[in-house]
Image (cartoon, rainbow, N blue to C red):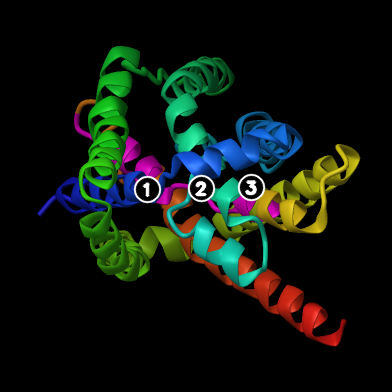
Amino acid sequence: MSSIFIVIPILVVLMFLLGTELDRKAFIGVAKAPRGVIAGMTGQLILLPAIAFATAWALDLSPVYFMGLMLIACCPGGSSSNVFTMLAKGNVALSVTLTALSSIITLLTLPVIMAYTARFVSMQSGETIELPIGKLIMQNIVLLFVPILLGVALRKISPGAARKVNRVLSKCAFPALMALALVFFLQYTQEIIDNIAILGSATALLILLAMACSSMLSRATGNDTAVRRTIVIEAGMQNAAQAIAIATSPIIFNSGEMALPAIIYALLMNIILLLYVFVIRKRTEKE
């Protein structure tokens, strides 16, 4: 079975889950302190792609991996970021807001950035990489925007049912993503082994640099500790399922190889962010 038939249901469920978490009160509360939103969105929509581009260029990644690294950088809004934010004693309302806003805004920013990247990579390598922008936008609307709206509608119509669905789906999100990673490892075992050094280095650098730069940005804009932790987590937690869906989609790139940076990123981001949460909690206990 093609992996696209596995990743699409997972992505739709994750986006529906996000929709069931959206609360108007949370947005109103965060709107009173917009610095966190501005810093978070700047980190996700500008810093991440810039860092990914510089990393891919510095490491001289092959065209398919260059595109794959840029793709994961352009897909913010990891489904587990609010859980990590809660564990790190961050601002959960801000986390949900940033995830929702970035998921919607990237409907516009992702095609623009990836179109530029495709042109750059094509010129540098001599290989022609085409990006069907219209199909990309349509797929993202169907797989991201519509499920989010359905989740919001369920919360509006039946808050109790939305909470129950949210509890169930939130427990399935992480195992589903890890199952997807396992499928890709089994399909591309030899290629992953052959390229683990370069792909591991690229994705680890992207995560660590994004977290560090977002932390400095958050401090520079005068945000409090809880907001800073939230922004760091949001910068490191990307929507791997979305990146995989775009890379493997038959109507867009149709490339399992392009999805490999997102697969490795999905594993590393959870390890690195769990360590970050562990350090934060230990430091909080001492204080």
Query: Going 39% across and 58% down the picture, which residue do you hit?
Result: 191
From the image, which quarter does the N terminus lie in?
bottom left
Helix, strand or loop at mark 1: helix
Query: Going 82% across and 52% down the picture, which residue do you hit?
Result: 224
Q: What span is colored magenta in the figure?
A: 232-250
Residue 139 visible, this angle? yes
Q: Position of residue 124 (x, y in %)?
A: 59, 20
- Residue 249 on the magenta span: yes
Q: CA distance from mark 3 to mark 1?
A: 17 Å
Q: Is residue 266 left or right of residue 274?
A: left
Magenta stretch prevailing secondary structure:
helix
Question: Is there a contact, CB below 8 Å, between mark 2 and mark 1?
Answer: yes
Asked if 129 appears above or below 64 in the picture, the reply is above
Mark 1 highlights which residue?
Answer: 18
Question: Is there a contact, CB below 8 Å, between mark 3 and mark 2?
Answer: no
Mark 2 highlights which residue?
Answer: 96
Q: CA distance from mark 3 to mark 2?
A: 13 Å
First in sequence: mark 3 vs mark 2 = 2
Q: Amino acid at mark 3?
A: Ala
Mark 3 highlights which residue?
Answer: 235
